[in-house]
Image (cartoon, rainbow, N blue to C red):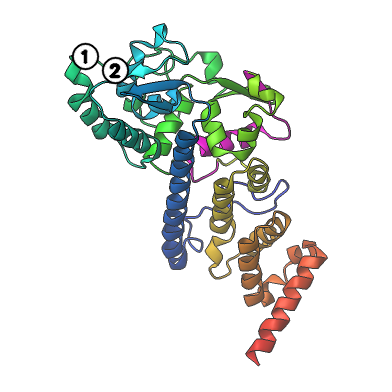
Amino acid sequence: MARCGEDSAAPVVILGSPGVCNKGFQRRGPYERRRLKAMVSEQLSQDLLRLLGEEIHTDVTFCIGCTLFKAHKAVLLARVPDFYYHTVGKTSNSLTNNEPVVVEHLEASEFRTFLQIVYSSNRNIKSYEDEILMKKILERGLSPKKPDLNPGKCKKLSDRSLLKNDISEDISDKEKSLISTDNYDLEPASELGEDLLKLYVNQCCPDIDIYVDGKSFKAHRAILSARSSYFAAMLSGCWAESSQECITLQGISQVEMNVMMYFIYGGTLDFPDKANVGQILNMADMYGLEGLKEVAVYILRRDYCNFFQKPIPRRLTSILECLIIAHSFGVGSLFADCMKWIVKHFARCWSERSFANVPYEIQKSCLNMLIQSLVSMT
């Protein structure tokens, strides 16, 4: 369970243990996770679709008749590697960055739809890719062999499953030591997220290194810019870092960076045990990751507030900590829910020693809310 605060005294409670995973939790938990997953998945799709439309950090251009389409090598390799091989792969060594790749046997409107699906579909699109290849590209008599674009990093991405410790065999021992395995069993929000996360985990064709406390995180400018307003500004050309191949981030730990990268690529819905939820809330706000803030709030509600079910031993302290965190980071919805729960169970909460550690202004707000609730009942 991720930590609530840096010096949190909240107990680690196994959610499946008796008294914690009650019927209310069992009903509320799956519903909240489905809601979160749908929201994060849709956000990821919209971010990638906007990246395609704005043509930011493109590195491959297709020519369909008289129409040009700009795209991103990383996204194509993650989602349609066979298509990339049959169109760009065979000619990539002889093309410059500005020279378009001619694609025959496809209409411009059909290719536009194809790219939109590649960038935004939340489902597995392998069958759609095969259909495009069989009906159009392979009409030229090209060999249907699988892509082998970069044996060291990008081999058969589409065939790999995202399991714990699933690191490419071709990555060196030194590189493996730079990859945290804490996050490898976290659930991506969608098939799109899983494909992009494979790209990141296998370090396929990165174009920027981000250093945090001496550790290198290999990434892709286009995906970073699409997902984070902070990185979009940093890499847009207005900052000195926009032209650098390596950048360094300050004020963030390696664990927090891992969480951020896994969310940027995969829209993951959980944090590793070492993660500090309060610090991640702060980081998400700094880097413009609203979806990551929603995941952090969900984890606080689930792991520390038990989705505001009936009071159980040692859970009161956790809810008080969440109240303070929500107030500190301006998470209004979580703060309001914590306040309502505390007022409802004020006899239990206010007798707790930990309530004395709550800042005075928050204690006063609790008291005022309690008075209002009592007045409304009379």
Q: Residue at x 54, y 17 (%)?
A: 175
**Which of the two residues, 88 or 342, is positioned nearer the viewer here?**
88
Q: Is residue 202 left or right of residue 321?
A: left
Point out the residue furthest to the top here. Answer: 94
Q: What's under tag 2, amino acid-wise? A: His
In the picture of the structure, the residue carrying the numbered disc 1 is 142
**Which of the two residues, 174 or 231, is positioned nearer the viewer here?**
231
Q: Which element type, helix, strand or loop, lies under badge 2?
A: helix
**Which of the two residues, 115 or 270, is positioned nearer the viewer here?**
115
Residue 287 in the image: above or below residue 139: below
Instruction: Find residue 208 and report its image quarter.
Output: top right
Q: Label for residue 39?
A: none
Q: Residue at x 37, y 39 (%)?
A: 191
In the picture of the structure, the residue carrying the numbered disc 2 is 86
Image location of residue 69, percent across then percent down: 40, 27
Q: Are marks 2 and 1 in contact (CB under 8 Å)?
A: yes
Point out the residue furthest to the bottom here. Answer: 378
Q: What's under tag 1, amino acid-wise? A: Leu
- 10 Å crowding of disc 2: few (<14), some (14-19), many (20+): many
Taking the image as drawn, is residue 180 in sight? Answer: no
Image location of residue 329, percent across then percent down: 70, 54
Point out the residue furthest to the front here. Answer: 66
State the extent of the magenta-drawn residues as a range: 245-271
- 10 Å crowding of disc 1: few (<14), some (14-19), many (20+): few
- Can you say which quadrant of the picture contains the C terminus? bottom right
Q: Residue at x 53, y 68 (%)?
A: 309
Indicate yes or no whether the magenta region holds residue 255.
yes
Image location of residue 216, percent across then percent down: 61, 22
